[in-house]
Image (cartoon, rainbow, N blue to C red):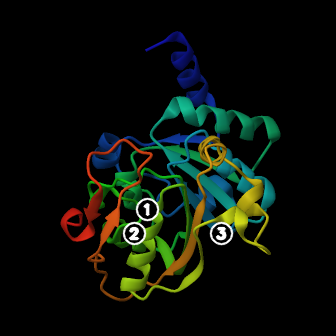
Amino acid sequence: MGKGKLAKFAEMAENPLVVECPFWQLQKEGFSLKGNWHQLFFKNDNPIVLELGCGRGEYTIGLARRFPDKNFIGIDIKGARMWHGAKTAVEEGLQNVAFLRTNIECIDGLFAENEVAELWLTFSDPQMKKATKRLTSTYFMERYRRFLVDNGVINVKTDSNFLATYTKYMVERNSLPLLQCTFDLYAEKDIDSSLTDIRTYYESMWLERGIPIKYLKFQLPHEGALEEPDIEIPVDGYRSYNHQVVSTKKTGK
């Protein structure tokens, strides 16, 4: 590991807005903030919003600036990337931000029932080969149900036509309330400016390449069995992949 990364990890360890919980720790010791984020960390009762796979933390920081009446937690395993957002939050004195370094697969072990109001999935890996790793799959929806409030909101912002198409079919297959859906966000009129004013590094990169940004917003009720959509979706041609079409029925198992 390079000296630069070591220095960033050292800073992260001292940053009061950064919490780390590796899988082994969760399995062995549990997680003291589970069910206690409002009381012990934020010290208020404002709604908690998670960004899964926050990367450098640009979106988490942007949302926290815009919505001071909400608490935002950026979650990722890549500490060197997260360092940027955590450093910015401290420098700006943001009190409604936290960064949690952990595996996304641990997510339902880190928050208690009804502790989270909303999720953001920003430019997630579409995981075209395996639905159980796809953050909008029913596999993850079941996990989100364990800590989201009833009818909690899930926002999906992506460059991937595959992920957007899959997510739309998943929502429709399970009759989830779809609040907003566009396959070309920047071509829309009368949209919330927070959807376009806050841009991550990857969003800017895809826009520069002329790839439309897709956005879906839906609710996740606690009740009702969830099923994977049985469709075939063309893969994203600009991503490295060796198939032309993926069957969600095959990848969902």
Residue 197 pos. (x, y %): 78, 55
Which quarter of the image is occupied by the N terminus?
top left
| Amino acid at dot 2 | Tyr
Marks 3/2 in contact by CB < 8 Å: the verdict is: no
Name the residue carrying label 2. 166
The local secondary structure at tag 1 comes to helix
Residue at (45% x, 46% y) in the render: 238
* Residue at x 59% of width, y 53% of height: 73
Q: Observer-nearest residue: 134 or 13?
A: 134
Measure how far apart labels 3 and 1 are at the Cα level. 27 Å
Q: Along the line of sight, which residue is nearer the eye, 1 or 148?
A: 1
Q: Residues within 10 Å of mark 3 (few under 14, many from 20)?
A: some
Q: Residues within 10 Å of mark 1 (few under 14, many from 20)?
A: many
Q: Amino acid at mark 3?
A: Pro
Image quarter of the C terminus: bottom left
Q: Which mark is residue 223?
A: none
User: Which of the 4 image quarters holds residue 43?
Assistant: bottom right
Q: Is residue 95 left or right of residue 30?
A: right
The vertical placement of 113 against 163, above or below, is: below
Which of the two labelled residues, at mark 3 and mark 2, occupies the earlier sequence position? 3
Which residue is rendered at x = 79% and y = 34% of the image? 91
Name the spot of residue 25 as percent of width and height, x first.
34, 42
The reply to whether dot 3 and dot 1 touch (C-beta < 8 Å) is: no
Q: Earlier in the sequence, mark 3 or mark 1?
A: 3
Q: Nearer the viewer, mark 3 or mark 1?
A: 1
Determine contact: label 2, label 1, CB under 8 Å. yes
Work out whether residue 25 or residue 161 is closer to the camera in this orientation and state it: 161
Q: Which residue is mark 3?
A: 47
Q: Which residue is mark 1?
A: 163
Disc 1 marks a residue whose amino acid type is Leu
C-alpha span from label 3 to label 2: 28 Å
Q: Secondary structure at mark 3?
A: loop
